[in-house]
Amino acid sequence: MPKPGEALSIILKLPGDVCNINCDYCYEKRKPASDDFAITHELLRTLFAKAKGRPLSVELHGGEPLLVGRERMRALLRECRAYIGKLRVAIQTNAILVDRGWIDLFLEEWPEIEFGVSIDGDAAQNAHRVDHKDRPTHAEVERALALLHEANIKVGAIATVTRVNCGAPHRLLEYFLNLPAVTFLKLNPCFDFQVAVSSRVNARSLAVLDPSGRGVPAWGLTPLEFRDFLCAFYDHWVEAKAFKRLLVEPFLSILRVLGGKRSKFCVYDYRKCTSVITLYPDGRLGSCDELSMPEALLARSIDEIEDLDRLVDLRTNAPLRADLEALLSKCTGCAYRTTCNGGCLATRKRYSGSRYYDEYCEYRGGVIEHVARSLGPRAS
């Protein structure tokens, strides 16, 4: 759990899972839908009252957070400004709706906001990010990034690594180096597994690599494929001295833990989901939003709890806490225990009982070892 003075991570699912685009690999579409559209500033005020002034790191998330509209967003940001404790605010958006009006609103209400934009590379590499008519979204995101650059707003990009972009790590790096607004890049693996067709899952390219129909969907990667991609990307990043221009996760975290420091990236930090609380528009509280519902539920309603501390460390969800302890017990005796810190609970649960469960460990150890070797004796 967070130590005194450390921020508790709060994910605000502002419009629930409602989104204006329809990415093939979106995990939100596989969760139970809610009839409640958006978090209100009154609900946020209730959350803050139960945080009781402790440091918070708030992420405006979705679905697509900008769908709540400017006036509701303004009210939410003013509620954040009124919080009595230390508060960091970030937003994760697909950027399709970003225009000068949105930029002016953020510069007025929260100029220090940290902007995160989802984009998987150039137009071809971004092929799985489509709208509800299966049309590409890439040009709109680049337009938004140009506006953010004009406003001198620095952006952290999240690129989901899929089968479309994993074969060209050098090309992917060069693309982001040529986006002047982007100063930080997080490479997220698309570790999709056993995705079922449903009314909410885009079946456009759901064909699986396993002929039995039980394996990895067409956009997904296996852990060892992601390992090979990361090692190649890292080599290009170092050889080009691109770290002077662009910070990249997970390499930043790996370098930190190899140096004996803490990672700020949950999958390399021992705290995992124990310091993450997600608020949904209907008042439910959950752990990390990548975990499925209802297994990640911490409280059915915010009105059930008097203090957010009650939810920290998964105290109100014994089965999920047991899953986390089982994950960490698997790491006992592992040579990478203090650098890997077990990885992602949601991914491990997804892979449970499959051959990818142990392959996940092999991927993480392989990337850590690759980075350590590049540092020479200093990392030993």
Image (tube, grey):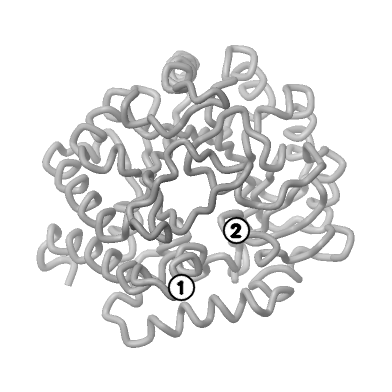
Image point (48%, 17%), residue name: 140
**Mark 2 Cα-neighbour bin, 10 Å: few <14, some 14–19, many ≥20:** many
Q: Amino acid at mark 2?
A: Cys
- 265 lies above or below 311: above
Classify mark 1: residues with Cα within 10 Å, few (<14), some (14-19) or many (20+): few
Q: Vertical placement of 101 versus 235: above or below?
A: above
| Circle 1 or circle 2, nearest the eye | 1
Query: Is residue 192 visible in the rendered structure shown here?
Result: yes
Residue 287 image offset from top left, x and y in percent:
64, 61
Amino acid type of disc 1?
Ser
* The one of 307 and 138 positioned closer to us in this rendering: 138
Q: Does residue 223 appear left or right of residue 50 in this picture?
A: left
Work out whether residue 145 or residue 167 is closer to the camera in this orientation and state it: 167
On the rendered structure, is 318 left or right of 21?
right
- Which quadrant is home to the C terminus? bottom left
Residue under circle 1?
Answer: 352
Checking the image for residue 39, the label placed there is: none
Q: Can residue 189 be seen here?
A: no
Task: Please name the residue shown 70% across and 63% down the image.
Answer: 294
Give 101 or 256, whichever is nearer the viewer.
Answer: 101
At mark 2, the secondary structure is loop
Examine the rendered structure and indicate whether residue 219 appears above or below residue 340. above
Mark 2, residue position: 288
Circle 1 sits in a helix, a strand or a loop, which is it?
Answer: loop
Question: For this rendering, which residue is in front, 1 or 23?
Answer: 23
- Residue depicted at x 34% and y 23%: 123
